[in-house]
Amino acid sequence: MVIKTFYLKDLDQRFKDTDANFTFYQSNLNTDLPHPAKRPGLFICPGGGYQFVSNREAEPVALSFICEGFNCFVLTYSINKMYPTPHLEAAFAMNYIREHYQDFDLIDENLSIIGFSAGGHLATSFAYLYPCLADSLHVNTKNIRPFAVIAGYPVISTDLSFSHEGTIRTITGDDEELIKLLSVENNITKDYPPTFVYHSEDDGLVPVKNSYVFIEALKANNIPYQADIFSHAVHGGSIYLRGVYDDFQETHKKALDNFIWVRHASEFIFSFLKK
């Protein structure tokens, strides 16, 4: 396994006051060959309410998608910061990866984004905010447009009647303009990337309605999408394997079967690579 961490402050002085970083994961099964296999990239945004970065939605996700044929990158973004801080960190990292895609053995500049819970909000909002983020960083807009989006039990809406209050208050600071800007379902356009979403109907922390309004917005704009809506799971279940949640209670054991979302999401992205 090839694992290497890049600190943004070592790459650009604009980030000198942050410890934000991204870690590259690559299988070394083919790296001893003269021409290692090129793979699509997956940029991973763990959740944590924008107040911490969840470990269970970081490396375990990277390892799972490596087995599905991706080279992976895990973002550790600044916490307890309002927009645009985490989004700009994601934008810089994605631009850096794409500018150096040959060093990361990626297929051309192919890089999709995946996020969980608050990281799902980061990923899904990033997918329409990238033009203004590119302008802020003075980078090519095309460099940071995600090839596809994967959202796991995502926080989507800023409507606190069914969203996650801590996530929304942290990223918006209750600023009215940011509340409008960061309500994902109200900002989807026909330019939005193909999207895979998964959630559970009994999610007690981030109601599944977030995914339902997201799906309706995707449908209204004719965005290719696929959804796995499970009847039962635990919020923060990540890949739903015991190595991530080894304290599963009896009532949660059947959620282990939800690991199928990883295969479904992978096939969804590969279906566009083949076109």
Image (cartoon, grey):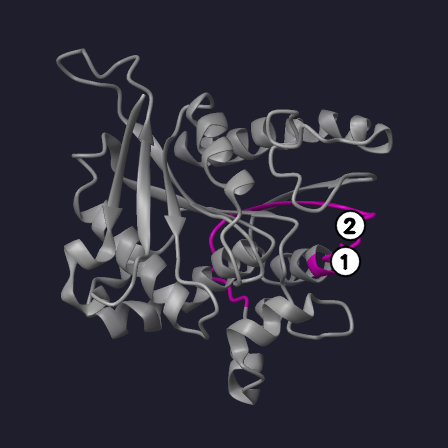
Q: Secondary structure at mark 1?
A: loop
Q: Is residue 3 left or right of residue 161?
A: left
Q: Is residue 165 left or right of residue 47?
A: right
Q: Residue at x 50, y 34 (%)?
A: 61
- Residue 155: quadrant of the picture: bottom right
Q: Residue at x 60, y 76 (%)?
A: 169
Q: Are marks 2 and 1 in contact (CB under 8 Å)?
A: yes
Q: Secondary structure at mark 2?
A: loop
Q: Is residue 128 left or right of residue 132?
A: right
Type of amino acid at the residue the image marks with label 2: Asp
Magenta segment main secondary structure: loop
Residue 207 is marked as 1
- Residue 90: quadrant of the picture: bottom left
Q: Which residue is mark 2?
A: 203
Q: x, y percentage for residue 268?
A: 54, 34
Q: Can residue 182 be seen at all in this image of the molecule?
A: no
In magenta, the rendered stretch is 188-210
Q: Is residue 262 above or below residue 171?
A: above
Q: Is residue 128 above or below residue 215?
A: below
Q: Residue at x 40, y 64 (%)?
A: 86
